Amino acid sequence: MNKQSGFTLIELVIVIAVLGILAAIAIPKFVSLQDDALVATKKGMSGAVKSAHAVAIADLKKFPTISELADYVNGDGVVAVTTGVQVKIDGDDFVVPTYTDSKCTTTPATPAVTDVVKCVGNI
């Protein structure tokens, strides 16, 4: 007697369909998590620049310029630009805006890297 064992075609199709359904459920959740992580990273980096601003004020005994503020921010790719402090998040550049007034309402934001920073905004 020659007995063959294995899966039937219908069993394989059912397994593939179940895997497809699971993938259809998991992939959108994963994309949403990536977006949430980017938002959280932006908030964290904005907070880091705000903390660096407070430290710079305490250290310098005056409001820092954008260039001085950028020196107080830890991280790779942190540079002073005319509208704030440019930071790198996952290889992309984002600017944490800085303002010359204490209420973060100046429009436009600080126009030069030598301007005094009195307020730091959010990305």
Image: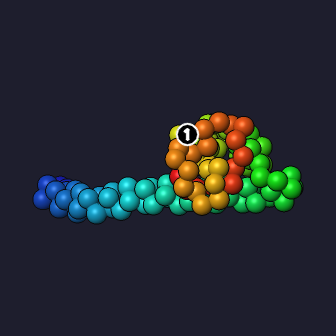
Q: Quadrant of residue 15?
A: bottom left
Q: Quadrant of residue 81?
A: top right
Measuring 26% from the left and 59% from the top, which residue is drawn there? 24
**Position of residue 35 in the picture relative to residue 112 (left or right):** left
**Position of residue 30 in the picture relative to residue 82 (left or right):** left
Asked if 50 appears above or below 83 in the picture, the reply is below
Does residue 53 appear anywhere in the picture?
yes
Answer few, some or many: residues within 10 Å of disc 1's Cα (few below 14, many 20 plus, some between 14 and 19). few
Does residue 88 appear anywhere in the picture?
no
Q: Residue furthest left?
A: 10
Secondary element at tag 1: strand
Asked if 55 appears above or below 69 in the picture, the reply is below
**Position of residue 31 in the picture relative to residue 75 (left or right):** left
Q: Position of residue 79 (x, y in %)?
A: 68, 38
In front: 112, or 9?
112
Tag 1: amino acid: Asp
Q: Position of residue 104 (x, y in %)?
A: 58, 57
Measuring 74% from the left and 44% from the top, which residue is drawn there? 65
In front: 40, or 17?
40
Q: Which residue is mark 1?
A: 93
Q: Position of residue 46 (x, y in %)?
A: 61, 56
Measuring 73% from the left and 55% from the top, which residue is drawn there? 53
